[in-house]
Amino acid sequence: MARSLNIIYFAWVRERLGIDQEEVALADDIETIGDVVTLLAERGAGYADLFSDTGKLRFALDQDYGIAATPIGSASELAIFPPVTGG
């Protein structure tokens, strides 16, 4: 059965892509958050530009913070957002 992942975008990430979320089909070789980001970057210029510097982004996999090397496993949701700052 094909795997899929719901990608949710927040703040300026959402604004730059023009969408709140999308469902992405994952091939068997997509194993980590970094693999998903690479897959998204290959979708076109807007995605490639946004994901060219992942240091400007944070990730949460099923609401737990993750890094590029974090395995996707059986997760159903990946949130992508800018770093949160407080004041």
Image (cartoon, helix red, strand yellow):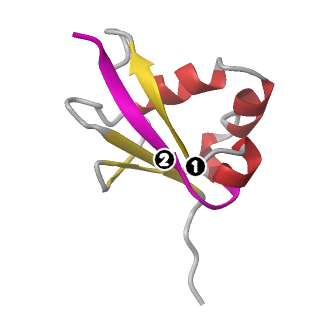
**Cα distance, mark 2 to mark 1?**
6 Å
Residue 21, percent from left and from top: 52, 43
Q: Which quarter of the figure has residue 87?
A: bottom right
Q: Residue 70 carries which label?
A: none
Query: Can you give x and y, in whole percent of width and height, for residue 37 in the image?
Result: 53, 30
- Residue 10 belongs to magenta span: yes
Disc 2 secondary structure class: strand
Q: Regarding mark 1 in the picture, which secondary structure is present there? A: loop
Residue 39 sits above or below residue 75 on the image: above
Q: Earlier in the sequence, mark 2 or mark 1?
A: 2
Residue range highlighted in magenta: 1-12
Q: In this view, does 85 lie to the left or right of 49?
A: left
Q: Quadrant of the N terminus?
A: top left
Q: What is the number of the mark on residue 8? A: 2
For the residue marked with disc 2, what is the amino acid? Ile
The reply to whether the C-beta atoms of the residues labelled 2 and 1 are less than 8 Å apart is: yes
Image side of residue 12 versus residue 86, left or right: right
Q: In which quarter of the image is residue 31?
A: top left
Q: At x 66% / y 20%, what residue is drawn?
A: 43
**Residue at the spot of label 1:** 20
Residue 57 percent location from the top left of the image: 58, 50
Please say if 35 is above or below 53: above
Residue 54, by quadrant, is top right
